[in-house]
């Protein structure tokens, strides 16, 4: 019975991801903790591999369309991957199932959800301010940050946050890229964010698996529901008000974040 419930939960989250583009970790991790009573370290570890597989196909498609700026992805990964490995080492030393570690993870997860809620609402209010097209001769300049260290440093923060909470590679990553590359068209920002999320969540997820924080049967059930959910959501996207759904999601994520912090 639980297996069907997990598949259904995966479908619902996949549907929302397909409709809005909001990261699955922002929704799935709180659902696993509050609805199914999964331990935080198992919910976070399992949910990290969730976007690694679901976004891999999207990355291949975007790469074929030449929408991914690999220099941006590389600079972000130069900070996020090492930060993820350092965070995994600290978690291993502390013990992921340790009560103090669980408290750190739930509190940080709550803060990450509040940040995601803010980022989601920001995209609703300011989404039209981001360019959607750019002249080819201006593209090279648009992919350069003010200083080379900025994407590496922000990448490190996202890497640590994602590894500790499974949240941050989606909405927060997009907002960071919008701030670092204000002249870059939105489709390229989203494409870079998706491409960066794949290696980061794969490294973090496999790292969690190595310390026993991944429930593989649970992951398979979630993927069985999420993949068709994303497909349905993507097809319904044109018929649904993106602003309304994102506004409701921001309220839901803020509520879940405050509840996690108060645990």
Image: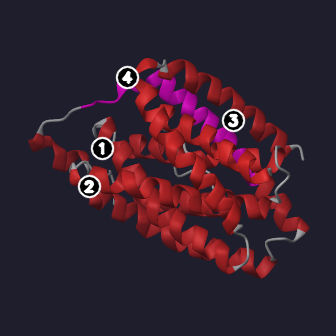
Display coloring = secondary structure
- For marks 4 and 2, the one nearer the N-term is 2
**Secondary structure beneath disc 1?**
helix
Q: Residue at x 45, y 53 (%)?
A: 55
Residue 205, quarter of the rendered image = bottom right
For marks 4 and 1, give the CA distance: 15 Å
Kindly identify which residue carries mark 1: 188
Taking the image as drawn, is residue 29 in sight?
A: no
Check if mark 1's residue and mark 2's residue have beta carbons within 8 Å: no
Callout 1 environment at 10 Å: few (<14), some (14 to 19), or many (20+)? some
Residue bearing the label numbered 3: 253
* Residue density around tag 3, few if under 14, some if 14–19, many if 20 or more, within 10 Å: many
Query: Disc 4 to disc 3, how far (Cα)?
Result: 23 Å
* Residue 95 at least partly seen: yes
Where does label 4 land, which residue? 128
Which of the two marks, 3 or 2, is nearer to us in this view?
2
Answer with the quarter of the image where residue 118 lies: top right
The 10 Å Cα crowd at callout 4, few under 14, some 14 to 19, many 20 or more, is few
Q: Which of the 4 image quadrants contains residue 115?
A: top right
Q: Secondary structure at mark 3?
A: helix
Q: Is residue 127 magenta?
A: yes
Q: Position of residue 99 (x, y in %)?
A: 90, 66
> What is the spatial separation of the Cα atoms under label 1 and label 2, in whole angstroms?
11 Å
Compare residues 41 and 164 and report the one nearer the observer: 41
**Badge 2 element:** helix
Q: Position of residue 161 (x, y in %)?
A: 62, 58
Secondary structure, mark 4, is helix
**Which sits earlier in the primary sequence, circle 3 or circle 2?**
2
Q: Residues within 10 Å of mark 2 (few under 14, many from 20)?
A: some
The range drawn in magenta is 108-132
Q: Which residue is mark 2?
A: 63
Whether 217 is drawn above or below 7: the answer is: below
């Amino acid at each position: 019975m639980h297996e069907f419930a997990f598949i259904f939960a995966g479908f619902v989250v996949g549907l929302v991801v397909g409709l809005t583009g909001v990261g699955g970790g922002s929704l799935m991790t709180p659902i696993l903790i509050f609805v199914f009573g999964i331990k935080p370290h198992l919910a976070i570890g399992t949910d990290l591999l969730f976007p690694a597989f679901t976004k891999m196909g999207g990355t291949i498609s975007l790469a074929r369309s030449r929408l991914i700026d690999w220099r941006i992805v590389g600079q972000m990964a130069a900070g996020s991957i090492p930060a993820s490995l350092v965070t995994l080492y600290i978690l291993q030393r502390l013990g992921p199932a340790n009560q103090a570690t669980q408290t750190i993870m739930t509190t940080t997860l709550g803060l990450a959800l509040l940040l995601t809620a803010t980022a989601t609402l920001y995209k609703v209010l300011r989404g039209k301010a981001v360019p959607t097209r750019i002249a080819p001769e201006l593209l090279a300049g648009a992919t350069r940050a003010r200083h080379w260290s900025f994407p590496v440093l922000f990448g490190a923060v996202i890497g640590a946050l994602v590894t500790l909470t499974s949240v941050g590679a989606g909405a927060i990553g997009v907002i960071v890229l919008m701030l670092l590359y204000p002249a870059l068209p939105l489709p390229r920002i989203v494409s870079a964010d998706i491409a960066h999320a794949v290696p980061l969540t794969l490294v973090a997820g496999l790292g969690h698996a190595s310390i026993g924080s991944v429930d593989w049967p649970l992951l398979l059930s979630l993927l069985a529901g999420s993949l068709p959910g994303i497909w349905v959501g993507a097809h319904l996207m044109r018929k649904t008000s993106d602003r309304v759904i994102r506004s409701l999601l921001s309220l839901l994520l803020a509520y879940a974040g405050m509840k996690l912090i108060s645990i």
